[in-house]
Amino acid sequence: MLPATILDDLSPYARVATAIAPFLAAIVLRLIFGKNRVTRLLLSISTTWFAINILMAPYSASMRRDLDHLWVIVSR
């Protein structure tokens, strides 16, 4: 089972939570521990994760089905 298929089974709220939770955790850790190398790294990684989730949202399972259907129609 591919990781993408695991994410397809999540509800929309769970998808949002998987995008936001690491970002919020990094912000909380930065507030607790202050600015240091580790919190900067965690914030950078979680920001990248959030951006990837936002950019990949249009390619969800339903959007992929629609794009596949369009590809079949166009390629005839």
Image (cartoon, rainbow, N blue to C red):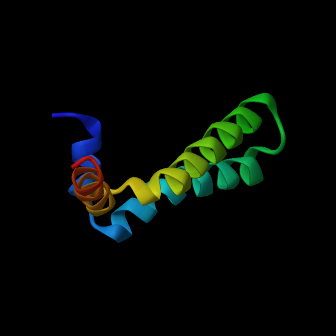
Residue 74: where, in percent of width, then height? 30, 53
Question: In the orientation shown, which residue stands out farthest toward the bottom?
Answer: 13
Left or right: 28, with 55 as reference point: right
Left or right: 11, with 45 as reference point: left
Count of numbered badges drawn on the protein: 0
Look at the picture and state if 6 lies above or below 1: below
Residue placed most toward the observer, 20 or 71: 71
Question: In the orientation shown, which residue stands out farthest toward the right?
Answer: 35
Question: In the orientation shown, which residue stands out farthest toward the top?
Answer: 37
Name the quadrant containing residue 5: top left
Name the quadrant containing residue 35: top right
**Residue at 55%, 52% in the rendered image:** 55
Question: In the orientation shown, which residue stands out farthest toward the left?
Answer: 1
Please identify the quadrant where the N terminus is shown.
Answer: top left
Residue placed most toward the observer, 47 or 73: 73
Residue 22: where, in percent of width, then height? 54, 50
Residue placed most toward the observer, 68 or 7: 68
**Residue at 63%, 42% in the rendered image:** 48
Name the quadrant containing residue 69: bottom left
Look at the picture and state if 59 lies above or below 16: above
**Residue at 44%, 62% in the rendered image:** 17
Left or right: 24, with 10 as reference point: right
Residue placed most toward the observer, 16 or 5: 5
**Residue at 74%, 48% in the rendered image:** 30
